[in-house]
Amino acid sequence: MSILCHPKTPNYPAPWILRSETSMQNVVFPGNQRVKIPMDKTITLYYRLVIHNGDVTSLNLNKMQKEYEVTPVD
């Protein structure tokens, strides 16, 4: 599984949680800093989940990310 992040996502490019142990590495919102979320507004996070068979060599994730970056999301 790969996660793509759209530029309209708050805190883009998103930081990642990276652990030294064998575990899931994941994109994170809001990161290490607190973010105030107004009660009168919504917040939308734009991610694309790419599910594959584990062989990422058969995918061009850079191309997929570039295509996602120009995809209208509103």
Image: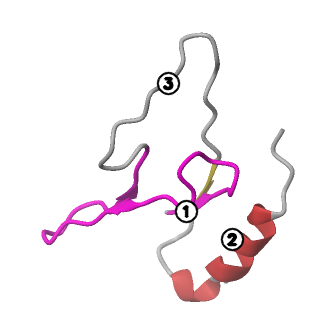
Q: Secondary structure at mark 2?
A: helix
Q: CA distance from mark 1 to mark 3?
A: 19 Å
Q: CA distance from mark 3 to mark 2?
A: 27 Å
Q: Which residues are magenta?
A: 2-29
Residue type, label 3: Ile
Whichever of callouts 1 and 3 sits on the residue coming sooner in the sequence is 1
Q: CA distance from mark 1 to mark 2?
A: 12 Å
Question: Does 61 appear above or below 71?
Answer: below
Judge depth for marks 3 and 2 and give the one in front. 3
**Which of the labelled discs sits on residue 13, or is there none?**
1
Q: Which residue is mark 3?
A: 37
Q: Secondary structure at mark 1?
A: loop
Residue found 50% across the figure and 24% down from its top? 37
Residue type, label 2: Gln
Q: Residues within 10 Å of mark 2 (few under 14, many from 20)?
A: some
Q: Position of residue 46 (x, y in %)?
A: 65, 45
Q: Position of residue 2 (x, y in %)?
A: 52, 65
Membership of 47 in magenta stretch: no
Of residues 58 and 66, the one drawn nearer to the viewer in this rendering: 66
Q: Which residue is mark 2?
A: 65
Residue found 47% across the figure and 74% down from its top? 54
Q: Main secondary structure of the magenta part?
A: loop
Whichever of callouts 1 and 2 sits on the residue coming sooner in the sequence is 1
Residue type, label 1: Pro
Judge depth for marks 1 and 2 and give the one in front. 1
**Image quarter (top left, top right, bottom left or bottom right) of the C terminus:** top right
